[in-house]
Image (cartoon, rainbow, N blue to C red):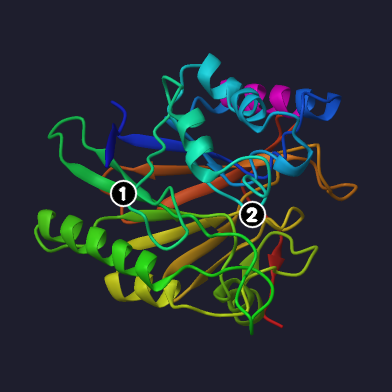
């Protein structure tokens, strides 16, 4: 478990980059690098989170070198960063163990291997402490959402496993106990959305765009219900579906898409690449969020979508 700190002004800012699909330094990759560097210089975050598909391993000549180049913007600007796996990061030519080792070569990397939970690696927690008291005031849960299902009866994508949910609940319980019995404000980051993303779009007022289907697992393993039960996670951030960027609140939890960052993959005309920015304020029970685009435009208020 790694610790960061709220700033002297009481805030903590996160930039979420997702779906870079970095390959071999193609012109599209260089555009992605420039976008990331521009956004980081504009937003001056305390942390960068890469929510999966950092590289597209199938088309990488050397996945390790590709990963090093993909995170270079954060390293060059001396910004702490953390990552979770997407379904394409280790699809071929490399393993999760190898890519975590590559990440941990870097000075500003916070990624941890975490416990071995089924076939998932990189489940870990980052605490954000008060600078005054050096005690946790927020927690970030990083989860490996897996890849493609190998189950004989279930196609599509893998789902968060019961062992992962059990690990999360253990971490949450410990942080709550150490916080005097009050749930600690928490956020969760993973690559593949879970089925409640469909529910929130269909049943609640959402803000932002849904230009493609929500590609979630066919099995609901109960991660969202665990968040509800533990009462600490107030925001979940995913990628995977490149031309969705909406957010909506379901049972007190904001379910949010990032904004696709990488140019080396599919997109939509009129839907620029960018990043989601998240800001916590020490002592406040929730967070604020906005999107920054590749031209520097900030979108703080997205279009409303009424329940269908």
Element assignment for label 1: strand
- The span shown in magenta is 32-41
Residues at discs 1 and 2 in contact (Cβ within 8 Å): no
Q: Is residue 201 above or below residue 272?
A: below
Marker disc for residue 104: none
Indicate left or right for 204 with 124 as reference.
Answer: right
How dense is the environment of label 1, judged by Cα within 10 Å: few (below 14), some, or many (20 and up)? many
Q: Which residue is mark 2?
A: 87
Q: Which residue is mark 1?
A: 139
Magenta segment: does it hold 58? Answer: no
- Between tags 1 and 2, which lies in front? 2
Q: Earlier in the sequence, mark 1 or mark 2?
A: 2
- Measure the alpha-carbon separation of dots 1 and 2: 25 Å
Residue under the image location 70 percent in, 29 percent down = 296
Q: Is residue 291 above or below residue 45?
A: below
Q: Nearer the viewer, residue 292 or 87?
A: 87
Element assignment for label 2: loop
Q: Main secondary structure of the magenta part?
A: helix
Instruction: Report which quarter residue 11 is drawn in.
Output: top left
Instruction: Report which quarter residue 57 is drawn in.
Output: top right
């Amino acid at each position: 478990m790694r610790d960061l700190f709220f700033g002297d002004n009481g805030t903590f800012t996160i930039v979420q980059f997702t779906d870079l699909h970095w390959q071999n330094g193609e012109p599209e990759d260089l555009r992605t690098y420039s976008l990331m560097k521009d956004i980081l210089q504009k937003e001056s975050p305390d942390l960068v989170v890469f929510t999966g598909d950092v590289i597209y391993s199938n088309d990488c000549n050397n996945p390790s070198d590709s990963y090093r180049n993909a995170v270079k913007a954060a390293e060059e600007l001396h910004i702490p960063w953390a990552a979770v796996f997407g379904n394409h990061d280790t699809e071929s030519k490399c393993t999760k163990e190898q890519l975590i080792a590559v990440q941990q070569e870097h000075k500003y990397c916070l990624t941890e291997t975490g416990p071995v939970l089924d076939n998932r690696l990189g489940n870990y927690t980052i605490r954000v402490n008060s600078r005054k008291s050096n005690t946790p005031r927020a927690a970030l849960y990083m989860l490996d959402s897996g890849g493609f299902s190998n189950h004989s009866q279930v196609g599509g994508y893998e789902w968060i496993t019961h062992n992962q949910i059990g690990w999360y609940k253990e971490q949450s319980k410990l942080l709550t106990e150490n916080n005097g019995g009050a749930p600690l404000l928490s956020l969760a980051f993973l690559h593949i959305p879970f089925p409640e993303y469909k529910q929130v779009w269909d049943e609640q007022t959402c803000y932002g765009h849904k230009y493609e289907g929500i590609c979630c697992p066919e099995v609901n393993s109960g991660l969202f219900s665990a968040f509800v039960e533990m009462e600490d996670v107030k925001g979940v951030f995913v990628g995977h579906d490149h031309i969705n960027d909406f957010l909506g609140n379901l049972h007190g939890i904001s379910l949010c898409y990032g904004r696709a960052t990488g140019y080396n993959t599919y997109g939509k005309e009129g839907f620029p690449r960018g990043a989601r920015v998240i800001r916590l304020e020490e002592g406040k029970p929730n967070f604020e969020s906005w999107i920054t685009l590749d031209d520097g435009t900030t979108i703080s208020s997205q279009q409303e979508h009424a329940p269908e």
